[in-house]
């Protein structure tokens, strides 16, 4: 039942925007009662955050693929796929439509659920790469770990989620690998 509720919330968000999303509409689409929604979520923002949380990829646990490039590419592709997904579209709609107070709640979710875990995963990959010798030790830093999330946010905000099919590989080969590789 929860998946049906999340699907209905994301469908309403992407088709009509946050302002037109209603608990009544979500309940009807999910074939449940409005009271059942309010027992679990005090507001539509809480519902939307949980729906996004259930759908967005988890950046931790990137497998050891033998090179930092391959592992970082795996992570970037995970996120470029998410940006192009319905959850990515819903997040984009949400960020464009929220009031300042609502945007803070959403920003906190993005930082805690997406940005910080992604940076942690990148730092883990960079540490593994430094141990293998394919990453220079000085590249294992929070500033370097910010490059991927910053580039993805830039593409989402400035280029309206448009990602060329080779974006992930170009980000690796033109930006990140030269930044992290051994001299």
Image: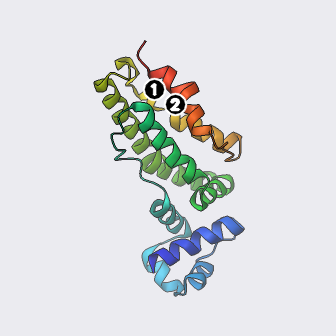
Say which quadrant the C terminus sits in: top left
The structure residue drawn at horizontal position 48% and vertical position 52%, both measured from the top left corner, is 109
The structure residue drawn at horizontal position 43% and vertical position 76%, both measured from the top left corner, is 40
Crowding around mark 2 (Cα neighbors within 10 Å: few <14, some 14 to 19, many 20+) is some
Colouring method of the image = rainbow
Identity of the residue furthest to the left in this view: 131
Q: Up-down: is 165 above or below 92?
A: above
Nearer to us: label 2 or label 1: 2
Q: Up-down: is 62 above or below 25?
A: above
Q: Up-down: is 138 above or below 32?
A: above
In-front residue for pair 173/149: 173
Place of residue 108 in the rendered image (x, y in percent of width and height, measured from the top left): 48, 49
In-front residue for pair 54/173: 173
Q: Are marks 2 and 1 in contact (CB under 8 Å)?
A: yes
In-front residue for pair 154/83: 83
Place of residue 48 in the rendered image (x, y in percent of width and height, measured from the top left): 54, 65
Identity of the residue furthest to the top in this view: 183
**Residue 91 occupies quadrant:** bottom right
**Residue 9 seen by the camera:** yes
Residue at numbered disc 2: 147
Say which quadrant the N terminus sits in: bottom left
Q: Which mark is residue 143?
A: 1
The structure residue drawn at horizontal position 64% and vertical position 66%, both measured from the top left corner, is 13
Place of residue 134 in the rendered image (x, y in percent of width and height, measured from the top left): 37, 23
Left or right, residue 25 beside residue 39? right
């Amino acid at each position: 039942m929860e998946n049906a509720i999340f699907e209905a919330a994301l469908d309403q968000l992407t088709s009509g925007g946050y302002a037109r999303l209603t608990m009544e509409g979500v309940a009807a689409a999910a074939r449940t009662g409005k009271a059942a929604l309010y027992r679990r979520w005090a507001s539509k923002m809480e519902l939307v955050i949980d729906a996004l949380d259930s759908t967005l990829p988890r950046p931790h646990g990137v497998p050891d693929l033998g090179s930092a490039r391959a592992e970082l590419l795996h992570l970037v592709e995970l996120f470029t796929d998410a940006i192009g997904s319905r959850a990515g579209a819903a997040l984009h709609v949400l960020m464009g439509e929220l009031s300042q107070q609502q945007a803070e709640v959403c920003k906190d979710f993005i930082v805690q659920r997406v940005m910080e875990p992604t940076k942690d995963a990148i730092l883990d990959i960079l540490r593994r790469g430094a141990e293998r010798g394919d990453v220079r030790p000085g590249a294992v830093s929070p500033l370097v770990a910010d490059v991927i999330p910053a580039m993805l946010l830039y593409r989402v905000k400035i280029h309206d989620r448009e990602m060329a099919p080779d974006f992930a590989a170009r980000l690796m080969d033109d930006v990140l690998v030269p930044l992290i590789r051994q001299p």
